[in-house]
Amino acid sequence: MLEKKGRSGKRAKLVSSDIAVKTAWLYYVEGMTQEQIAERLGVNRVKVMRTLAACTADGVVVTSINAQTSRQVELERALETRWGLDAAVVVPTPSGEEHLEKSIGHAVALYLGEEMQDGMTLAIGGGATLHASLGFMARRALKDASVVALVGSLPHSQWINPSIVAAKVADIFGVDSYQITAPVVVNDPALRDLLWKQPELTDVRNRAAAADIALLTVGEMSPTATVFRYGIVPQDAMRDLERKGAVANMLCYFIDADGGLVDHEVNDRVMAIDLDVVSAVPNVVLAAGGRQKVAPIRAALKAVEANVLITDSETAMALTKD
């Protein structure tokens, strides 16, 4: 199991693809007490008792856990143990890879719908997976809440503009959004440093650092990855980045297999919140899946202290293996 570094603050609430089955699993398979389960779920003991009784009445629990989602819950628990997570959500891997982003995006939408409350700040990255979640989010009005973009903007783009995700999530929740009003990648590291000294951008960075939830995804080193496919970073830089050890990108930063930033000039020109700042957010959620993202997810879980991982079953299985 990967040990977490010490971090102050409350653990993220335990979540699941099927919370009733997970409750039964913790009680009947892992032998946790009802009090322990209630604490992890953030509910009272009576709620746990009723869930367990309903599982028995519905035939979910006989002498073993009998539900289609039991395999997903088993993988969730394996991920939580292997990577020191507070919670994992595993969705079935769809038959067609083209549906994977929507499957994970749906789980992301359900998670945010449950976890985002009045007074909270969500810091959010970009990417296809997070963009896919937008179509599943239910509109509701939050009070005194906000959404902060973790990545800069693109002067010319469609859905792939990282700031669009933050703005649309804010609109869904009826709250203000805060943007990094600068290109995702600037031409000169000195310009990047100068831009971060602007009071407006300093305010955005401070808001991101004070966020309650950080929602991220991770990209692979491939010409089809969003960061290369849409020219956010030139494709001809990919080979040089790989020679430097890059296996993934998070918030357009390129990281190696150990989760460290690679020594490449692109990383000095990225207008995004630093990964160590994001890692300090109390509840860091990573959403990604697909066989090509197994190595990137491993690197991402080392780069940031993720509390929650949302992925698919085939990816989860690979991530539980050493």
Image (cartoon, rainbow, N blue to C red):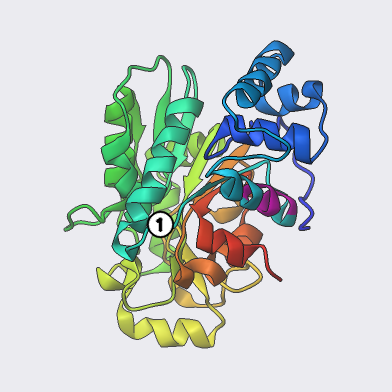
Quadrant of the image occupied by residue 302? bottom right
Instruction: Report if residue 167 is visible in the image.
Output: no
Check disc 1 and give the amino acid type.
Met
Residue in the picture at 62% in, 48% down: 76
Residue 192 image offset from top left, x and y in percent: 41, 59
Check the picture and name the quadrant holding the N terminus. Answer: bottom right
Q: Percent x, y for residue 189?
A: 43, 67
Residue 79 is covered by the magenta coloring: yes
* Category of crowding for the residue at label 1, using alpha-carbon neighbours closer than 10 angstroms: few (below 14), some (14–19), many (at least 20): many
Q: Position of residue 158 (x, y in %)?
A: 17, 54
Residue drawn at x 26%, y 39% as measured from the top left: 135
Q: Is residue 267 magenta?
A: no
Reading the image, the residue beneath label 1 is: 271
Main structural element of the magenta stretch: helix, strand or loop?
A: helix
Residue interval drawn in magenta: 76-81
Question: x%, y% of residue 307?
Answer: 63, 44
Q: What is the number of callouts on the image?
A: 1
Q: Nearer the viewer, residue 167 or 15?
A: 15
Residue at the top extreme, as displayed:
46
Of the pair 35 and 269, the residue shown nearer to us: 35
Asked whether, in this view, residue 201 is left or right of residue 230, the answer is: right
Drawn side of residue 294 relative to residue 2, left or right? left
Asked if residue 149 is positioned above or below residue 231 in the image, the reply reads above
